[in-house]
Image: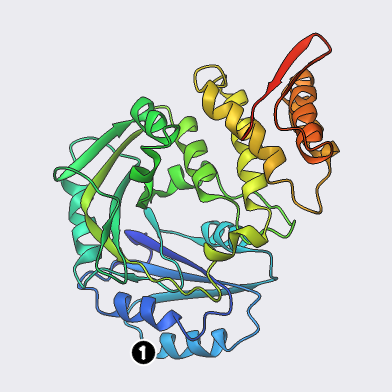
Amino acid sequence: MQKNKKPFLSVITPTYNRGDKLHFAFQSLLSQTNKDFEWIIVDDGSTDDTKRVVDKFIEKSDFKIIYKAIKHGGKHFATRAAYEIASGQYSLELDSDDELYDENTLDNLYHTVKVCQKNYPCIGGCFIDQNNQIFPKLDGEYLDLDKESYLNLFFDKNGIDTLNISWMMKMDYARSYLPPKIKDNLSYFPEAIINVNRVLKCKNFHLRVFNRPWYRYNMYNADSVTVNTFKTNAFWYYAKSLIETLNKYQLDDKYHDAFIQQCKNLFNYLPNNKTLRDNYMVFNNIGKPLLFAKFLSRYLLKNIFAVNHHTIVLCGVKIKLKKGD
């Protein structure tokens, strides 16, 4: 490989206190038949032996490893830092406790890009879990999506699981929307919001999802970001960000049910360090303060007065509460 030639792929791994698990990812990369990639590890302020472990990887490796340590801020900070130094033509995010499916995974991805007829900004693949179950469940060899069909799946509660995929993205596409710099008891900024913003910003979005596994997905309950999401503000930020995104792209009417559900969730997942004023600012910033009054009334009646079925009129707005709202 030429000295200054950009690698085909930047494999991005944010990590935090996973020194005892990083070997899964490393061994799967070491076994790859295609070595046209760099591995970027961003250490999100680990207090274990992560650096020592990575130093040993570098000694053994026959591919480029870039290690960067940052102050602890959450997975979204580490991911953003990785994209700031990545030099690949494409990016592939590999969690610190996961591994590539087999030794031909990166070679298959390389050839997949070469044979795709359309100039896809991203392609996707499946996961295989610890029980050898492949997800998501797809029919056929692959699934092609444009912007409209992607959004329809994203906002369909029965279809969104189809988008639970691994992404390989053109670097400029990936950088079009990076995780925001938010410090707020947030272990990670919701990745689904990052993806949908990239899709909406892309003028000619096309995604091909291949019905074959790219990753072996492992779950470690003690320190998993996924498992510990309820301990963070991720659900509140998901609701806030999706409300703002739908409003920005004038999609709150088209995807009305999803918009209203996230308005409810803004109150349902109100964290201890957030106030009703924080919710008001969300609605005020999108020019819908009256909508805040509606959902505030629901919140007060349910949580303060314990009313489960009631109808009131506030500022000319009729609000009907049903059990379970």
Q: Is 132 on the left-hand or right-hand side of 306? A: left
Outermost top residue? 316
- The image quadrant that residue 217 belongs to is bottom left
Q: Is 53 on the left-hand or right-hand side of 272? A: left
Residue 260 in percent (x, y) is at 60, 27
Tell me which residue sits at (51%, 41%) in the image: 176
Is disc 1 surrounded by few (<14), some (14 to 19) or many (20+) residues within 10 Å?
Answer: few
Indicate the secondary structure of the residue bearing disc 1.
helix
Read off the residue under disc 1: 60
- Amino acid carrying label 1: it is Lys
Viewer-closest of 163 and 78: 163
Residue 65 in percent (x, y) is at 43, 76
Q: Is 313 on the left-hand or right-hand side of 160? A: right
- Is 215 located above or below residue 263 in the figure? below
Tell me which residue sits at (63%, 39%) in the image: 239
Quadrant including the N terminus:
bottom left
- Is 195 located above or below residue 85 in the figure? above
Tell me which residue sits at (69%, 70%) in the image: 72
Tell me which residue sits at (34%, 28%) in the image: 149
Number of disc labels? 1
- Color theme of the render: rainbow
Viewer-closest of 205 and 289: 289
- Is 63 located above or below residue 310 in the figure? below
